[in-house]
Image: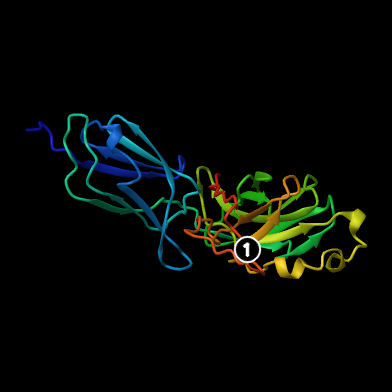
């Protein structure tokens, strides 16, 4: 008979470390700790449904750390389910499923709306400035901003903190399409992301060229729906990269890709890359 009952004593969500720490009464057998019996979901604030939250797992004696692959959504319900199968180093088995609801607490409740650029606005090369407003009863006057070439915010072009003002200017963006989002922050806490916007940095050398004439297929290949997929052609590899995400930044469970004609995917190379922060 085991000297101590094997079970879970606490679940701690750390916004600063972007992690969930699960504490057990005994040290763990690492071979029995795996994503097959640990499920993490987050409530989607737009749909009201639960989405799967992806994570990396580490074991430290009697503690499991689940480090999120994407930014934690503050003040919304997460659900942790640990199914039977986890064992201690002395062979005790976790009996029954463990279910716990929790949230990443944040005192930052103000929301941010981007005022400029307008969605799909074309901006002259080397002349990018964005402005925004902060709305709420308790304002932080501090912000965190991200700019990326895809709306999954994988491989960021720029990320920066802005203190005490509601505008940001940079001359570092090369011509092309970008996506931008911003949120209020205070110390190690932050609020919701602003609604996503996209803009195009124009190349002055080509400003007299009618884009509709230069590529007559643009209307067929471009999707301006914020919630749909965006297709981007990689100039270096001449391959198509499809990226998509929901407005709050949670990776969707599936992608629906529609072409304008039948395609042969027998030799297609499909790669899914997670969005890191």
Q: Residue at x 66, y 55 (%)?
A: 180
**Mark 1 lies on residue:** 263
> From the viewer's perspective, is residue 19 above or below residue 255?
above
Q: Is residue 121 left or right of residue 38?
A: right
Which is nearer the eye, 19 or 109? 19
Q: Residue at x 75, y 45 (%)?
A: 236
Crowd class of label 1 (few under 14; some 14 to 19; many from 20; radius 10 Å): few
Residue 266, image quadrant: bottom right
Residue 78 in sight here: yes
Q: Residue at x 40, y 66 (%)?
A: 49
Horizontal and vertical percent position of residue 85: 23, 43
Which is nearer the eye, 113 or 83? 83
Quadrant of the snapshot with the C terminus: top right
| Label 1: which secondary element | loop
Horizontal and vertical percent position of residue 210: 88, 66
Horizontal and vertical percent position of residue 173: 77, 48
Quadrant of the snapshot with the N terminus: top left
Which is nearer the eye, 113 or 203? 203
Residue 150 in sight here: no
> From the viewer's perspective, is residue 224 above or below residue 201?
below
Q: Is residue 2 left or right of residue 116?
A: left
Which is nearer the eye, 57 or 172? 57
Horizontal and vertical percent position of residue 161: 64, 44
Q: Residue at x 16, y 45 (%)?
A: 95
Coloring scheme used: rainbow
Total number of numbered discs in the rendering: 1
Q: Residue furthest left?
A: 1
């Amino acid at each position: 008979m085991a000297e101590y009952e094997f079970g879970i004593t606490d679940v701690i969500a750390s916004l600063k470390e972007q992690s969930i720490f699960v504490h057990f009464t005994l040290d763990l057998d690492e071979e029995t700790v795996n994503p097959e019996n640990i499920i993490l979901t987050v409530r989607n604030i737009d749909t009201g449904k639960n989405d799967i939250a992806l994570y990396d797992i580490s074991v430290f004696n009697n503690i499991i750390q689940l480090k999120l692959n994407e930014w934690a959504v503050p003040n919304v319900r997460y659900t942790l389910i640990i199914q039977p199968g986890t064992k201690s180093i002395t062979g005790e088995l976790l009996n029954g499923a463990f279910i716990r609801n929790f949230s990443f607490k944040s005192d930052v409740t103000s929301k941010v709306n981007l005022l400029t650029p307008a969605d799909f606005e074309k901006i002259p090369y080397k002349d990018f400035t964005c402005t925004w407003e902060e709305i709420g009863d308790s304002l932080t006057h501090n912000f965190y901003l991200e700019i990326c070439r895809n709306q999954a915010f994988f491989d960021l072009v720029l990320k920066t903190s802005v203190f005490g003002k509601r505008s940001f200017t940079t001359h570092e963006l090369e011509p092309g399409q970008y996506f931008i989002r911003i949120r209020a922050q205070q110390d190690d806490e932050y609020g919701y992301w602003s609604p996503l916007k996209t803009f195009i940095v124009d190349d002055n050398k080509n400003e007299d060229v009618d884009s509709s004439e230069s590529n007559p297929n643009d209307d067929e290949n471009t999707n301006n729906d914020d919630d749909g997929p965006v297709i981007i052609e990689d100039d270096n590899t001449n391959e198509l990269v499809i990226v998509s995400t929901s407005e709050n930044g949670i990776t969707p469970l599936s992608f629906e890709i529609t072409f304008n004609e039948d395609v042969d995917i027998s030799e297609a190379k499909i790669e899914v890359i997670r969005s890191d922060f």
